[in-house]
């Protein structure tokens, strides 16, 4: 057993209002550069919809992530190492720019230089790739708020098995927002796909990064990631991806998308996990059991045995404390209301989602006297506007029961709080029906509804005293390229520390 | 032996080799960030799939042919029982196929670069020189293999061009060997040195990054930011009690 710490995020989808503030602030911080115009480390998709890039969830064609081979061994879905090298001159699974969108800017100069005329001048769109005028047919958030859904939403890969049921008429349509960043997976297929060894997981916090000095632009990470969250900068010809805002996180601050989230939907924390069991968990035969397998990897940070092992594995005391207060651990494992996105990709993703509980009141049958009992939520779960199976395709590898259990917990929480706040009574029976005590429901309410900043974001700061090279490497070619450390015998002399690759069991 | 012959068959090679070696060291130390294949597959992939595969696999075969023909002495192949006529036939037919495949690939890639408005702007001036040199070198190589050796009068380049090339690296240059070779061979070799001199400053550096070590590598790589504290040192947490996030409580 070897315990490592891993940062994670949970997003409560009920609270997302689809304002794209996360996307915009992320772009301003990270991808506001030539070559990265089309790159959104964070994007907010309207579901149902084909997404960004188009149909990224369709692994039959994209061949991202992992799969089990005939002998039930975990293999990259795009093929083995040797066959990858044979395809290095042209990667057949790479999305092209049109799958994202052709980036553009506007000819703003016309607005000030146009001669006087009857009609006002128009700034036309010009491609950032060719400089030519562009007839806009697709762009970022082209599907925002179900735009074009009647013709396109059925192409959403999550609609599998629902084609007959779902009608895209206005009265019956459903939608919710799905903000997406890199999953910083425990078993990242992008890292496994990179032939140059430029991508890596940080031992301390599990953040997945691209070493820009070592990337040679072979592009297999882009196709290897099933979430399509590694991008190719077309100016620098290097891979780029969400950094989990590591410079902020190291200082104990939330990522910029979390910091600026208007709906306060995001939770950040760390989990302690057993790295020796990753392969076994990701090789779980039944995809619907991958959720439990991943939850089994998360170690209970209060268990004295876990604490002892964590200390032995060099995890600092304040990190263990942070793991105990982690909202990610609480929502995912203690209360089991957060679910991983597409667990069937077998990458063991670490950005999880609390599924949305659609408008509930509408589907509750009226009583005989015409009144409705808003507490009758359990019966309403199957009639929610968002089809259970749609959420199941998205968050539980198609297992409806998992979604139902989460939604029942959320429904019970809602009824429990309504009763407590309106009549002052504590109804213990509600929690009992979903396997939670009233104290749990109260804690869940605190967390999901009114949690303050430091309860939503529990990030221990990086231990600088362990990385005495950090300050010295300022202004060098990057922290992840070559660490510099102070020589013990002669503090003035800088020593180069070779990058250490460690083989996982 | 004229001084002109010494300049182009001895001085030029040494200058080119020096630039090649020093240039690569300089580039690797100063510009790892710029060291990439500069792929344009994101902009266009259908034509690239044909052009790039034909060109690269053809080029690999052609490079292999050069190694066999230029680096391996004729005496060695004869020692293992390969007659000159057998070698000649092999090199003429295999060389012609490899050369044609490379050439077709190159034409497809050039067509793609010229016709696609998304690829054009990614072309740098160094690219233009490299493409021009490559095109001329491949056409010259094809004329030698097909025009001279397959259909023409044939020319055994191994005792002349091959020895001249190897002697450069043995620091025992013999420019006169090359001075008597046919003009086609002279031009091909002459221009090739310019490609070698340009190599470290062009996108061709990606050739040295072919990630063969990927084959035996573990899939998931971890890197530690910090050195592991040596065993027996006092716990860092104890010696720095104030480092925990003050917000958590």
Image (cartoon, coloured by chain):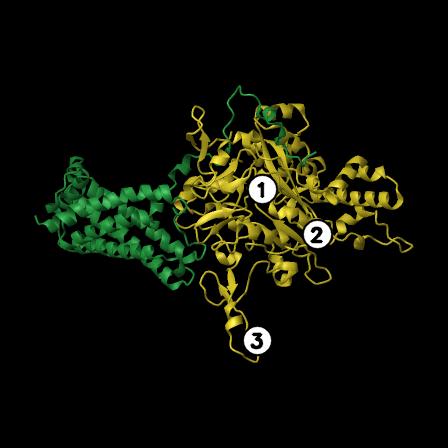
Chain colours: A yellow, B green
Asked if the residues shown at circle 3 and circle 1 are in contact, with their CB atoms under 8 angstroms apart, the answer is no
Residue A84, x across and y down, in percent: 43, 44
Along the line of sight, the residue nearer the viewer: B184 or A128: A128
- Helix, strand or loop under label 1: helix
Residue A385, quarter of the rendered image: bottom right
Residue A363, x across and y down, in percent: 79, 54
- Helix, strand or loop under label 3: loop
Instruction: Kindly identify which chain the residue marked by label 1 belongs to.
Output: A
Neighbours of disc 1 within 10 Å: few (<14), some (14-19), many (20+): some
Q: Is residue A286 visible?
A: no
According to the picture, the residue beneath numbered tag 3 turns out to be A120
Residue at the farthest left position = B1
Along the line of sight, the residue nearer the viewer: A77 or A29: A29
Disc number lying in front (2 or 1): 1
Marks 2 and 3 belong to one chain: yes
- Residue B218 vs B11, above or below: the answer is above
Left or right of B79 in this view: B33 = right
Q: Residue at x 17, y 46 (%)?
A: B11
Left or right of A241 in this view: B206 = left
**Which numbered disc, 2 or 1, marks the residue that appears first in the sequence?**
1
Q: Residue at x 47, y 54 (%)?
A: A35
According to the picture, the residue beneath numbered tag 1 turns out to be A248
Numbered badge on residue A387: 2
Q: Residue at x 79, y 43 (%)?
A: A412
Neighbours of disc 2 within 10 Å: few (<14), some (14-19), many (20+): some
**Which numbered disc, 3 or 1, marks the residue that appears first in the sequence?**
3
Q: Is residue A463 visible?
A: yes
Asked if the residues shown at circle 2 and circle 3 are in contact, with their CB atoms under 8 angstroms apart, the answer is no
């Amino acid at each position: 057993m070897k315990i490592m710490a891993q940062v994670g995020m949970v997003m409560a989808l009920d609270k997302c209002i689809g304002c794209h503030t996360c996307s915009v602030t992320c772009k301003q911080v990270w991808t506001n550069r030539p070559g990265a115009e089309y790159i959104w480390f964070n994007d907010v998709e309207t579901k149902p919809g084909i997404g960004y890039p188009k149909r990224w969830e369709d692994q039959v064609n994209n061949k991202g992530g992992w799969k089990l081979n005939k002998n039930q061994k975990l293999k990259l879905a795009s093929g083995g190492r040797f066959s990858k090298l044979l395809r290095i001159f042209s990667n057949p699974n790479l999305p092209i720019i049109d799958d994202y969108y052709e980036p553009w800017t506007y000819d703003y100069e016309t607005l000030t230089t146009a001669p006087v005329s009857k009609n006002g001048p128009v700034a036309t769109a010009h491609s950032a790739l060719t400089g030519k005028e562009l007839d806009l047919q697709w762009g970022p958030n082209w599907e925002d708020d179900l735009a074009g859904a009647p013709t396109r939403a059925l192409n959403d890969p999550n609609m599998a098995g629902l084609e007959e049921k779902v009608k895209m008429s206005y009265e019956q349509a459903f939608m919710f927002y799905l903000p997406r960043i890199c999953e910083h997976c425990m078993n990242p297929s992008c890292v496994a796909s990179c032939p140059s060894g430029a991508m890596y997981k940080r031992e301390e916090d599990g953040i997945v990064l691209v070493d820009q000095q070592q990337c040679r632009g072979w592009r297999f990470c882009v196709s290897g990631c099933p979430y399509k969250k590694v991008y190719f900068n077309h100016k620098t010809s290097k891979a780029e991806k969400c950094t989990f805002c590591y410079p902020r996180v190291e200082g104990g601050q939330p990522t910029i998308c979390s910091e600026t989230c208007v709906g306060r939907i995001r939770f950040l924390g760390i989990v302690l996990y057993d790295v020796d069991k990753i392969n076994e968990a990701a090789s779980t035969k039944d995809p619907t059991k991958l959720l439990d397998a991943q939850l089994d990897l998360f170690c209970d940070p209060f268990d004295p045995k876990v604490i002892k092992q964590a200390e032995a594995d060099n995890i600092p005391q304040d990190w263990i404390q942070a793991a105990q207060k982690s909202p990610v651990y609480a929502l995912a494992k203690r209360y089991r209301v957060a679910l991983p996105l597409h667990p069937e990709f077998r990458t063991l993703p670490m950005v999880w989602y609390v599924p949305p509980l659609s408008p509930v009141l509408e589907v509750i049958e009226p009583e005989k006297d015409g009144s409705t009992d808003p507490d009758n939520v359990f019966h309403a779960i199957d009639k929610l506007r968002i089809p259970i199976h749609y959420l199941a395709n998205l968050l539980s590898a198609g297992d409806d029961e998992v979604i139902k259990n989460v939604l029942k917990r959320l429904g019970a929480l809602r009824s429990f709080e309504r009763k407590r706040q309106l009549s002052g009574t504590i109804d213990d029976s509600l929690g009992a029906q979903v396997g939670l005590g009233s104290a749990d429901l109260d804690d869940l309410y605190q967390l999901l509804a009114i949690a303050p900043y430091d309860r939503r974001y529990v990030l221990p700061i990086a231990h600088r005293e362990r990385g005495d090279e950090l300050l010295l490497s300022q202004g060098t070619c990057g922290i992840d390229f070559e660490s510099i450390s102070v020589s013990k015998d002669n503090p003035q002399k800088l020593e180069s520390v070779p990058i250490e690759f460690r083989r996982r069991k | 032996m004229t001084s002109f012959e010494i300049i182009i068959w001895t001085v030029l090679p040494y200058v080119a080799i020096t630039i090649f070696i020093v240039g690569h060291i300089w580039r690797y130390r100063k510009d790892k960030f710029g060291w990439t294949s500069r792929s344009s597959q994101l902009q266009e992939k259908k034509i690239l799939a044909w052009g790039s595969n034909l060109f690269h696999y053809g080029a690999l075969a052609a490079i292999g042919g050069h190694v066999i023909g230029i680096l391996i002495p004729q005496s060695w192949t004869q020692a293992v029982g390969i007659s000159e006529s057998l070698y000649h036939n092999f090199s003429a037919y295999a060389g012609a196929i490899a050369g044609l495949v490379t050439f077709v690939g190159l034409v497809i890639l050039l067509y793609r670069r010229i016709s696609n408005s998304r690829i054009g702007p990614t072309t740098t001036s160094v690219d233009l020189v490299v493409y021009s040199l490559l095109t001329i070198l491949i056409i010259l190589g094809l004329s030698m293999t097909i025009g001279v050796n397959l259909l023409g009068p044939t020319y055994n380049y191994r005792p002349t061009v091959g020895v001249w090339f190897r002697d450069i690296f043995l620091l025992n240059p013999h420019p006169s060997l090359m001075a008597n070779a046919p003009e086609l061979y002279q031009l091909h070799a002459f221009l090739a040195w310019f490609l070698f001199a340009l190599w470290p400053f062009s996108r061709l550096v990606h050739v040295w990054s072919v990630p063969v070590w990927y084959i035996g590598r573990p899939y998931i790589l971890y890197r530690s930011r910090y050195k592991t504290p040596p065993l027996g040192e006092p716990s860092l947490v104890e010696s720095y009690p104030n480092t925990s996030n003050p917000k958590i409580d």
